[in-house]
Amino acid sequence: MLRLKTDPSPHHGHHFHFEDLRAPNALLLALEGRAPWEYAALLASMPWLRKLPRGDGHPVLVFPGLGANDFTTAPLRRFLDGLGYVTHPWGQGFNFGPRQGVLERCTHDVRRLFNAHERKVSLIGWSLGGLYARELAKELPDHVRCVITLGTPFTGHPRATNAWRFFELVSGQSVHDPHVLAQLRREPPVPTTSIWSRSDGIVAWRCSVVAPGPQAENIELHASHVGMGMNPLALYAIADRLAQPAGHWKPFEPHGARRWFFRTPQAEAKHAA
C-alpha cells in the first residue's frame, strides 16, 4: 500500500532556500490564458509529431492535475496511443487530492498493468498528478520504467503555488506537514524527467526542479501550467523520453534546432564545467 513516509531529512542539491519561494505573480497567472493557443498549436503540429519514432507498446499510466480529470489528459493519451504506446487514464474522476482510497487505487493500477503487460509501466503526471507518479515509483520501483512530470511542485512549499488554498479546500488536508514535504522532495529510484516552464503561472518554477543525477533530469520549455499537457513541445519531449529502450535511459540532449525550444540545465552545467 502506498503511503507518504515520514523522512525528515532535507533534500539537497538546490541553490535556493525552499522558504524563500513565492507563488507566481499576477502577470504570470494572467498568462495562463494562453492555454487554448497551446492546444491550437498542438493541432497544427500534429502531422509533424506523428512522424516521431514509434513506441514499443509498453503501458503508460497518466495522472491529471488538481481539480482535473481524464478529459484533460485525453489529447496526450491519444497522441501516445498513436505512437504505439498503450496508455491508461487514472480513472478516478476529478483529482481532489490523495483522499481516502485514492493512493491505494493508484498502487493497485500500477500492479495490475505490470502484471497484465508483463512489462514495467511508465508514469506521467501533470501538476499534482506528478506527485502521485513520483510516490508510486518510490513505492514500486520494480514495476515502474520511468517517471515524467509536468509542472509538478515537489520541492519548496505548497504556498509557492497559486493552488494551495484550493487543494486544502477540496482535499480536506493541510499543506503544512514538514515530514510529508520532506518525503515529496526525495527523488524516485527510477529515471525521472521534470518538464517545467519559467512562465508557469500556477507553480513557481523552482518547485519543479530536480537535483540532476544519474537518473534525474530537467527539461525547460515555454508553456503555461494549465496548457502544458497539450503543449506540442512538452509532448515532443515526452515522446522522446518514452522512446528510449528499457534499461538504457540517457538524459535529454537538445541538439540542432531543438536548442531553440528546449533548455536542459543539467547539460548547460556540464558544458560550463
Image (cartoon, rainbow, N blue to C red):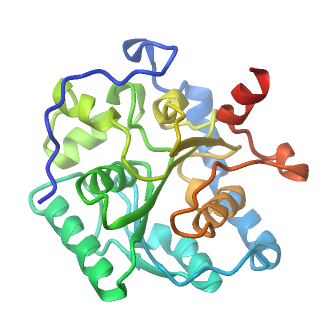
Which quadrant would the N terminus be assigned to in this image?
bottom left
User: Which of the 4 image quarters holds residue 162?
Assistant: top left
Q: Is residue 173 above or below residue 105?
A: above
Residue drawn at point x = 34 percent, y = 25 percent: 157
Residue drawn at point x = 52 percent, y = 69 percent: 246
Q: Decide which of 255, 233 is in the foreground and name it.
A: 255
Q: Is residue 19 above or below residue 85?
A: above
User: Which of the 4 image quarters holds residue 83?
Assistant: bottom right
Relative to 153, 3 lies left or right = left
Q: Is residue 197 above or below residue 111?
A: above
Instruction: Mark yes or no: residue 177 visible.
Output: no
Relative to 65, 58 lies left or right = right
Relative to 131, 105 lies left or right = left
Residue drawn at point x = 44 percent, y = 44 percent: 152
Which residue, as the protein is rendered here, is positioned at the far right?
Answer: 256
Which quadrant would the C terminus be assigned to in this image?
top right
Instruction: Mark yes or no: residue 205 visible.
Output: yes
Q: Decide which of 149, 72 is in the foreground and name it.
A: 149
Q: Decide which of 41, 195 is in the foreground and name it.
A: 195
Relative to 134, 33 lies left or right = right
User: Which of the 4 image quarters holds residue 7?
Assistant: top left
How far from the left and from the top, in percent, is residue 231?
A: 66, 58
Residue drawn at point x = 21 percent, y = 48 percent: 170
